[in-house]
Image (spheres, helix red, strand yellow):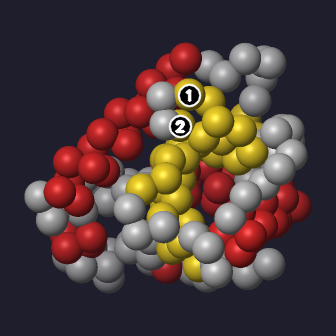
């Protein structure tokens, strides 16, 4: 599995993978057009290199330690964790003004899972078993 979306001067941005080596956020990203992918990656690069995005229309604190990258018309939810990492949990197309409660709950659940698995050393360590079987995520995205 390829965890890293982008490694910047301030943060490392990674995809979240569940215990079955599935990444909702990466699957959503792969379904987007090249232009939509680039819009997201530009925001990721700014955050990772500068440490902050001042425009709340592009990055926002959604509460409960969940944040959102907001490349129109899409949303990518994420959280900050130790090691100066930002973990991107899930992505979806925005269809209403308010953040859908179910998407925020998914992000919170993924955050809890990530924290529990990293504490038990079962998150990154397990990924070596799946590295060869996950070919799509090994493709490098450049922008």
Q: Is residue 12 above or below residue 44?
A: below
* Residue 131 locus on image (x, y percent): 32, 79
Visible residue check, residue 75: no
- The answer to which image quadrant residue 139 occupies is bottom right
**Quadrant housing the C terminus:** bottom right
Q: Are marks 1 and 2 in contact (CB under 8 Å)?
A: yes
* Residue in the picture at 64% in, 36% down: 61
For residue 11, say whether it is visible: yes
In the image, is residue 8 above or below residue 82? below
Q: Is residue 77 left or right of residue 69?
A: left
Q: Which residue is mark 1?
A: 63
134 on left or right of 86: left
Above-or-below relation of 28 to 109: below
| 117 left or right, relative to 108 | left
Find residue 32 and report its horizontal and vertical position in percent: 74, 53
Give 54 or 37, whichever is nearer the viewer.
54
How far apart in space, not on screen, are marks 1 and 2 (Cα)?
Answer: 6 Å
Residue 122 falls in image quadrant: bottom left
**Quadrant of the image for the N terminus?**
bottom left
**Disc 2: which residue:** 66
Q: Secondary structure at mark 2?
A: strand
> Residue at point 49% right, 79% down?
138
Q: Which mark is residue 5?
A: none
Q: Nearer the viewer, residue 140 or 7?
A: 7
For the residue pair 81 and 109, the one nearer the viewer reads as 81
Where disc 1 sits, the SS reads strand
Rendering coords of residue 47 (x, y %): 71, 63
Q: Residues within 10 Å of mark 2 (few under 14, many from 20)?
A: some
């Amino acid at each position: 599995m390829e965890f890293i979306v982008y490694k910047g001067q301030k943060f490392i941005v990674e995809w979240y993978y569940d215990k079955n080596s599935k990444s909702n956020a990466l699957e959503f990203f792969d379904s987007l057009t090249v232009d939509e992918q680039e819009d997201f990656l530009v925001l990721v690069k700014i955050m990772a290199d500068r440490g902050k995005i001042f425009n709340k229309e592009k990055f926002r604190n959604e509460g409960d330690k969940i944040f959102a990258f907001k490349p129109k018309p899409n949303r990518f939810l994420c959280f900050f964790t130790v090691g100066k990492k930002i973990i991107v949990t899930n992505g979806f197309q925005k269809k209403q003004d308010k953040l859908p409660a179910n998407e925020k709950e998914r992000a919170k659940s993924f955050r809890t899972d990530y924290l529990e698995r990293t504490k038990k050393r079962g998150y990154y360590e397990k990924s070596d078993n799946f590295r060869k079987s996950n070919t799509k995520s090994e493709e490098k995205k450049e922008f």
